[in-house]
């Protein structure tokens, strides 16, 4: 099963791409796969399958999630955002 | 020339223990002692400014009258090596909302004022003719005098500042730093800004308050060092904070600036568009930071004493013009008005800078105007006259637009900005009053779509789909305001349902508002938020190193409650009622239609639930009033 990550802001700048499709049944698996597909995210953004506190993940644009055991659906889109929403 | 005595109390480190009161009517100045217990309770910035304003601005004072006071409040951290600490707050009663207004700005003016030897500058009275207030703090005690501004009247703030600094320049002496108003402030546009070095104290119309006093600018200099209680400890803390400020917590602001919000908010369908009729914008990608950076020259700038450098200044292709761009300006003059041409938006921001207009209120008022025209509620050729306008219309007659006043037309936005900023007769005179007063004149349907709370136009966060923000807007003391509530942090937090606010949302919103009140009183830039792991503990240590007080996280938490309630108490004295703590009717009647926010709507019962929980959480009564017992408990008076 694959899920899509949409990258915004600093994550997109680091990755150099706006979107990645990676395998993963759970959020933790998907994050590890994303870090593998895009090494520049490994460390500052994704650490040991978990998201850095400076970033947020929105599941399909509705709720914000971080539980690595969260089971994903193949239609899910994960929006990787800066934790800073201030403007 | 008026001299002051050198009086004042010996205060804690970081303070001078006095404020300077200037009466423009008499040209006199007085140094007023600030009790150390007041400084400890209200800290500085918006907190100290509120305390002083509550005393200097008698209840019921007309904001544009001679008796009105405007407070420039500094903080104990100004002048220290702490990153982002070169800031000042401008606190006054707003001519737009008739409620408390506190606007922040940054940089060398704050440093110069602190060196002049006071913790705040209070300006009252009215000049006999357009004038400059010069405050010379070099020497034993500050000396003030008024100079003519006849040659500067009508200039943009930036031009006036440049000329004034050249005029006051003395070789081998400390230089003056200035704040100034633009043509909109002179014309008493109710949302005119006050600016310093291109940065605006933007919201609530403090520029009009100075304009009503015929005060074009203030120049200040000084040569006093700020005494710090524990310099070595402070230097170590400052170094550590600076290093951390260069890390991932501020990466968004450093690399992209606040403009980075454009794509994110569009994707989440929380981007106010077409006067809040929609929450996504087809032109968002073209206005994004990523697109702008790819097509034009961009430079990055910082305020004085800042290591973050969040200011992204864009060049306009084919010109030498440079425009400092923030998300709020981009949304208000872009998606809110349906304008997707980045050059048109940059030009609109440049016009606002030139005239001295708050971009959020200007964009909100124009978007409202365009929708009223679209719906046939307003005939632009025969607009109604405003009731109780702040000032007379400008001279002559307004040129006919000669363009289509519709959403999406950048030229229409430019025309309306010039018209409102100069109070041109007719439409400009009406728009200069802001969307609330416009809607009151038009009545009926217009009132439900006027995008304001308490008269202050709503910033770039769709309240139906960000319901913690909706509450923050509703209860905000200065009106619809994102900076004082910071409630978007709740909407963007795990476990929060941004489409359905409840009592827990309100309690979380109190925490973000409290933290914002502390940051705005200390004053530190909010973009440092993510740098702190233990905000109250760390800032208590910073304050202790500067002042010498044994400060704890618990004391700062209590201070935050005091600061928020003191601001509310000011409003309550001015006639605030519970009915003001709401949002325009549109948000309760029309659900959003698109994307992840489809179906989102506010309900009266939902907002009532959040509001009641907020009032209770603040210790106010169920009508939102501040009880006398709480005022005593928090030592507000």
Image (cartoon, coloured by chain):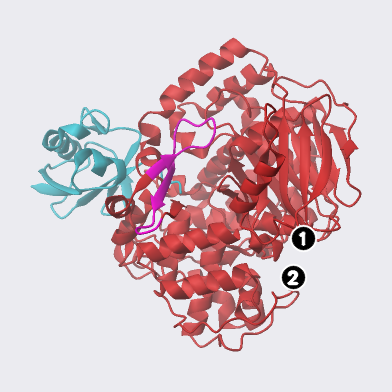
| Dominant SS in magenta | loop
**Chain of the residue on which disc 1 is drawn:** B
Q: Which chain is red?
A: B
| Left or right: residue B47 compared with residue B64 | left
Question: What hue represents chain A?
Answer: cyan
Q: Is residue B318 magenta?
A: yes
The label on residue B391 is: 2
Label 2 crowd (10 A; few <14 / some 14-19 / many >=20): some
Residues marked 2 and 1 touching at CB (< 8 Å)? yes
Q: Is residue B498 magenta?
A: no
Residue nearest the observer in this picture, B162 or B222: B162
x and y percentages locating residue B434 in the rendered image: 62, 69
Q: Which residue is mark 1?
A: B212
The residue under the point 48% across, 35% down is B529
Q: Residue at x 48, y 59 (%)?
A: B349
**Where are the magenta residues, as a range?**
B299-319
């Amino acid at each position: 099963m694959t899920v899509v990550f949409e990258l915004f802001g600093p994550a997109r700048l680091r990755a150099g791409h706006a979107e990645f499709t990676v395998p993963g049944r759970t959020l933790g698996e998907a994050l590890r796969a994303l870090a593998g597909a895009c090494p520049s995210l490994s460390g500052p953004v994704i650490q040991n399958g978990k998201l850095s506190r400076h970033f947020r993940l929105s599941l399909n644009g509705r709720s914000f999630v971080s539980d690595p055991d969260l089971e994903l659906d193949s239609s899910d889109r994960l929006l990787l955002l800066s934790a800073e929403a201030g403007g | 020339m008026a001299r002051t005595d050198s009086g004042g109390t010996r205060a804690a480190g970081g303070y001078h223990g006095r404020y300077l009161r200037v009466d423009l009517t008499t040209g006199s100045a007085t140094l007023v002692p600030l009790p150390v217990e007041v400084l400890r309770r209200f800290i500085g910035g918006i907190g100290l400014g509120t305390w002083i304003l509550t005393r200097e601005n008698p209840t019921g004072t007309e904001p544009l009258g001679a008796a009105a006071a405007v407070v420039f409040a500094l903080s104990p951290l100004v002048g220290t090596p702490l990153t982002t600490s070169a800031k000042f707050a401008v606190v006054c009663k707003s001519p737009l909302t008739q409620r408390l207004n506190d606007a922040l700005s940054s940089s060398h003016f704050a440093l110069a004022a602190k060196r002049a030897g006071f913790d705040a500058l209070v300006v009252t009275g009215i000049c006999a003719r357009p004038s400059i207030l010069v405050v010379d703090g070099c020497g034993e005690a500050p000396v003030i005098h008024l100079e003519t501004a006849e040659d500067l009247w009508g200039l943009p703030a930036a031009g006036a500042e440049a000329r004034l600094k050249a005029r006051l320049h003395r070789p081998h002496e400390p230089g003056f730093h200035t704040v100034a108003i633009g043509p909109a402030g002179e014309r008493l546009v109710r949302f005119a800004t006050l600016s310093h070095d291109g940065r605006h104290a933007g919201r609530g119309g403090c520029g009009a308050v100075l304009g009503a006093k015929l005060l074009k600018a203030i120049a200040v200099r000084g040569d006093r060092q700020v005494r710090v209680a524990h310099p070595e400890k402070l230097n170590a803390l400052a170094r550590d904070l600076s290093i951390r400020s260069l890390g991932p917590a501020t990466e968004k602001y450093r690399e992209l600036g606040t403009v980075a919000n454009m794509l994110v908010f569009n994707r989440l369908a929380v981007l106010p568009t077409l006067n809040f009729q929609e929450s996504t914008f087809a032109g968002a990608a073209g206005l994004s930071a990523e697109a702008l950076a790819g097509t034009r020259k961009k430079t990055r700038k910082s305020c004085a004493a800042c290591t973050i450098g969040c200011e992204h200044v864009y060049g306009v292709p084919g010109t030498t013009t440079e425009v400092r761009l923030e998300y709020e300006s981009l949304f208000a003059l872009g998606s809110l008005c349906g304008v997707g041409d980045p050059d048109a938006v940059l030009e609109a921001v440049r016009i606002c800078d030139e005239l001295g207009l708050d971009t959020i209120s200007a964009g909100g008022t124009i978007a409202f105007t365009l929708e009223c025209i679209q719906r046939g509620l307003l005939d632009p050729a025969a607009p109604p006259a405003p009731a109780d306008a702040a000032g007379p219309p400008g001279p002559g007659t307004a040129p006919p637009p000669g363009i289509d006043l519709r959403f999406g037309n950048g030229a229409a936005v430019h025309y309306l900005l010039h018209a409102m900023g100069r109070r041109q007769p007719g439409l400009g005179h009406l728009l200069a009053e802001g969307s609330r007063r416009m809607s009151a004149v038009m009545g009926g349907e217009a009132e439900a779509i006027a995008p304001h709370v308490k008269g202050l136009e709503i910033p770039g966060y769709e309240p139906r789909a960000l319901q913690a923000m909706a509450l923050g807007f509703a209860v905000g003391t200065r009106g619809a305001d994102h900076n004082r509530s910071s409630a978007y942090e709740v909407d963007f937090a795990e476990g929060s349902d941004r489409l359905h606010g409840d009592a827990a949302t309100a309690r979380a919103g109190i925490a973000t508002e409290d933290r914002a009140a502390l940051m705005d009183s200390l004053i530190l830039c909010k973009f440092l938020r993510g740098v702190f792991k233990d905000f109250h503990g760390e800032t208590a240590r910073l304050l202790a190193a500067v002042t010498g007080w044994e400060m704890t996280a618990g004391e700062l938490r209590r201070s935050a409650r005091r600061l928020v309630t003191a601001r509310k108490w000011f409003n309550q004295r001015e006639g605030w009622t519970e009915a003001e703590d709401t949002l325009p009717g549109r948000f309760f009647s029309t659900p959003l239609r698109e994307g992840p926010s489809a179906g989102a709507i506010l309900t009266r019962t939902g907002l009532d639930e959040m509001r009641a929980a907020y009032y209770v959480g603040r210790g106010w009564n169920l009508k939102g009033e501040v009880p006398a017992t709480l005022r005593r408990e928090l030592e507000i008076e």
